[in-house]
Image (cartoon, rainbow, N blue to C red):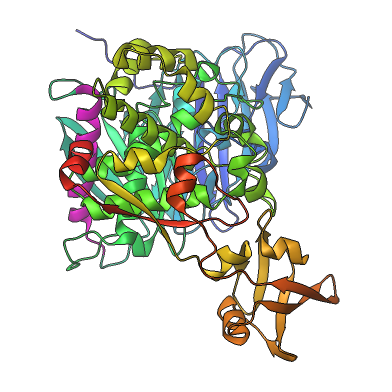
Amino acid sequence: MPTARPAEPADLHYRVEPSDLHAHLFRVVLTLAHPAAGQEVSLPAWIPGSYLIREFAKNLQQLKARQGRRAVPLTQLDKHRWRVDCRPGRPLELRYAVCACDPSVRSAWLDAARGFFNGTSLCLRVHGQEAQRHTLEIASTDATAHWSVATGLDALATDERGFGLYGAADYDELVDCPVELGTFWVGHFDACAIPHRLVVAGATPSFDGQRLLDDTRKICEAAIRFWHGTAGKAPHASFLFLLHAVDDGYGGLEHRNSTALVCGRRNLPRQQQEAKAGENYTTLLGLISHEYFHTWNVKRLRPAEFSTYDYSRENYTDLLWFFEGFTSYYDDLLLRRAGLIDDAAYLKCLAKTINQVLQTPGRAVQSVAQASFDAWVKYYRPDANTANATISYYTKGALVALCLDLTLRREGHATLDDVMRALWTRCQQGPMTEADLHAALHACAGRPFDAELQQWVHGTAELPLADLLAAHGVDLKAETPQLAQRLGLRVAQDHGLRIQTVLRGGAAEKSGMAAGDEWLGVEARGQGWRVRKLDDVAFYAGTETALTAWVARDGRLLRLALELPARGQAGSARKKARHGTATPAQPDTISLTPSDRNALRRWLD
């Protein structure tokens, strides 16, 4: 019979109090029962799942140390690390505050309506004692007397609202369980006999909680059965969804037995809404599916470089195209298999991904493996040149998964589903390398896939999308390009026309336009016209192709000769996708339509 965990603080104990809501301050007391001489502590510089050094220590303030009544000197060693000149063997108490002003899922937030935090933002790491048991006490105040708490941590001694004592086996578990505080909606369901909770903060009165519960359950059951079949047991004993609804926002972060999500309020299902999921709601369901799939693919089946997290620095891997990209392939596919979207909606989602890749000139510059490695300095730090120099490991990785799946199915020996399950058996609990993927593909398909992976993952050639899709009952067609595509521009059109990105080799670049320019007007046939949106350009140009563009740059007015490409100049998407002749300067918009519904459903079912 298992021994119950004790309901008292561990040798490493954190007390977190939302002390000043209007100042956005959490107060933290860390008690070490057995500190080392010259004990070092630090706050992580990043959070696993979000590959950017975020310098959480910038929000920590008023750090002080005591042993009994004696104040203990502290020495800051670098940007996020301190040495405590304490006596060994005597309890040590560290007190500090953290300013919580980040409304994303990656850090911490506190105001009069809501609190949220990840342990990486609040909990100092005690060097040399990371593997010991940790406890977290979440304290209430008069200002939060009506709040509740939700977290995936093991509850040891908590009240009916969730305030009290929680336990974690080690530091990794402590910081991998985000905490939600406030007044929120809570729902429960079982998926394949596993209890799940769904917490929603910020919803409007029209929110249809029961529909979201029902649909999330279908997603979870589809994922569990994907990995384990009908008789398998998932690796988590329970699961918690923390969803924050905001006016405008989107994102998620995976954790071992929970996920933190943010969505726009208009993405939530509403009471008396039609049964068919609209595009906004489908976007939310895809996010839920994506983060839940990560429970297996990256949290347990993880790259070798993540077998032990180094919280102080970048943890490089060139496999994010697999862990994020393959998850992105399956997130919408599992919605289709769960019956939440139909074939047409799935193909629309897939077409969106293909268009995002085709309309990114950087796909001819950077391989998706290099994009994975460079995530720390490029993906999370976009600028005006990002589209020209990089490719997303999410979208390109999803298309690599698509091509592998369709190739396997066309050859008739296996599917990518079989490969994923083989990897789970081979590498569950990690670590995983690309060699493991090669081995799993070879074992399932009966032949090596080295050439395909070299070309699709480590090279920049176009993927054979059109031929593979055609073999599975889908026709890829080029659509008439919009003016922004014909020009090679990405623009903002709020209160004027401002250029955000000039795509490599396009008409806009040839004219001399630059990111940051304000496009003020055009001249055609000797007449000048004020423009405030791109539609104005087309309207005043008429059939003319030789224009003069007036732009403002750094306080100067510039006249630029602009050659407007013809409407049909986008070229053949099918030809480009098949033969690798895509021209970054003139990206396509494609659509996907069924040509053989039986073949399509053999793939999607």
Query: Residue 405: x and y, percent?
Result: 33, 30
Q: In terms of depth relative to the viewer, which is nearer, 507 or 322?
A: 507
Residue 31 in the image: above or below residue 570: above
Residue 335 in the image: above or below residue 556: above
Q: Is residue 74 visible?
A: yes
Quarter of image, res 376: top right
Query: Residue 57: x and y, percent?
Result: 67, 36
Residue 79 in the image: above or below residue 553: above
Quadrant where the image shows the C terminus: top left
Image side of residue 450 versus residue 214, left or right: right
Q: Is residue 147 visible?
A: no
The residue lying at 64 percent from left, 33 percent from top is: 374
Query: Residue 492: x and y, percent?
Result: 61, 69
Image side of residue 20 versus residue 313, left or right: left
Image side of residue 578 versus residue 535, left or right: left
Q: In terms of depth relative to the viewer, which is nearer, 188 or 150?
A: 188
Quarter of image, res 69: top right
Q: Which residues are magenta?
A: 207-228
Is 216 contained in the magenta span?
Answer: yes
Is 445 contained in the magenta span?
Answer: no
Query: Residue 459: x and y, percent?
Result: 58, 30
Q: In terms of depth relative to the viewer, which is nearer, 543 or 494?
A: 543
Q: How many marks?
A: 0
Magenta span main SS = helix
- Extreme residue in the right direction: 556
Quadrant where the image shows the N terminus: top left
Q: In terms of depth relative to the viewer, which is nearer, 353 or 149?
A: 353
The residue lying at 23 percent from left, 24 percent from top is: 412
